[in-house]
Amino acid sequence: MEKLQKALQKARESREGQALDARPAVTAARAPVSTEGPWAELAPFTPDPAVLHRHRIFSYIAQKEAAPFDVLRTKVFLAMRQNGWTRLAITSPEQGCGKSTVACNLAFGLSRQTQTRTMLLDLDMRRPGVAALLGCRPQHNMRDMLTGQVSPQDHMLCVNGNLALAMSGGSTADPTDILTARQTGEVLDTLQARYAPHVMIFDLGPMLQTDDARAVLKYVDCALVLAKAEQTRASHLDTCEREVGQLTNVLGVVLNDCRHVEAEADYYYQGEV
Ligand SMILES: Nc1ncnc2c1ncn2[C@@H]1O[C@H](COP(=O)(O)OP(=O)(O)OP(=O)(O)O)[C@@H](O)[C@H]1O
Ligand SMILES: [Mg+2]
């Protein structure tokens, strides 16, 4: 979190080509969720709680298993609000660290804050994971939305009136070209202007295996770096954190699947999930 202090001055202006001040600030956008307007036009989606639970998405309701994710949600939300940030990326050094699981838990946890509008975008276009975790089969891919072949209102689904999901029904072979295109930045800006989300969560691919995640980091305000306990090498985590830090603000490093804290986690959150 020390990096947050250092990052305050360079936060918004540092991102290439982004007029951050034009974006709605988190604090300024805390209006009640409307039953009219662009959010009401999105197709509703009600995930099956059994599917969510099976995929370790616990935070759709307040329950014991959701507690670590709820603490992470609130820490992230407060830090982003304090800094006027709205766009959060989630990445890791290598695949399988739990990025999509954490992204979904953060999104559903935020959606329990009824006054908060949240958007979850699956930008791991090579290996999209969000739709499968939620038991959903989108008709289109993120590629279709980012290239303008399908409109956001026809692509996104909405949970509970305040969580918009932009997912992929299949993989895109070489997404870097799309992710670096000017049009992608414009689509993201349009989403932000039209839906005024308080938080946009970008589920990304791993940093050290392709350059897809790197391409997206220029669009975000901050990032969480995930490591998997007893799997991620310290050297890989170090390299990943450094590279992410060159492109955006590192909000924190989350040690995922850390089994030795389970007993304490009944009552306290120890910083891992
Ligand atoms: N805290 C956890 N405890 C146990 N298993 C977990 C935990 N977090 C994630 N997993 C499991 O690890 C696997 C990978 O999770 P997930 O798909 O979220 O990772 P990912 O980083 O998004 O992977 P990829 O890089 O392939 O997109 C899944 O089977 C998931 O259920
Ligand atoms: Mg994933």
Image (tube, grey):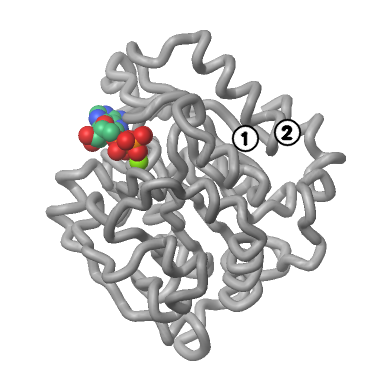
Residue 98 on image: x %, y %: 35, 34
Q: Quadrant of residue 187?
A: bottom right
**Helix, strand or loop for disc 1:** strand
Task: Identify the residue at the far right of this view.
Answer: 9
- Residue displayed at 43% across by 85% down: 40
Q: Quadrant of ligand 1?
A: top left
Give 13 or 52, whichever is nearer the viewer: 13
Q: Is the residue 239 above or below the residue 65 in the image?
A: above
Circles 2, 1 touching at the beta carbon (< 8 Å): yes
Residue at numbered disc 2: 4
Query: Which one is nearer the viewer's eye here, 79 or 214?
Result: 214
- Residue closer to the observer: 72 or 92: 92
Can residue 248 be seen from the camera position used here?
A: yes
Mark 1 CB lies closer than 8 A to ligand 1: no
Residue 271 can be seen, yes or no? no
Instruction: Assess disc 2: are there few (<14), some (14-19) or many (≥20) residues with their C-alpha within 10 Å of its C-alpha.
Output: some
Q: Quadrant of residue 256?
A: top left
- The kind of residue on which mark 2 rests is Leu
Position in image of residue 123 (x %, y %)? 45, 51
Horizontal and vertical percent position of residue 235: 52, 9
Residue that numbered label 1 is attached to = 251
What residue do we see at 27% from left, 39% from top? 65
- The numbered mark, 2 or 1, whose residue comes first in the sequence reads 2
Residue at the extreme bottom? 36
Position of residue 266 in the picture relative to residue 20 (left or right): left
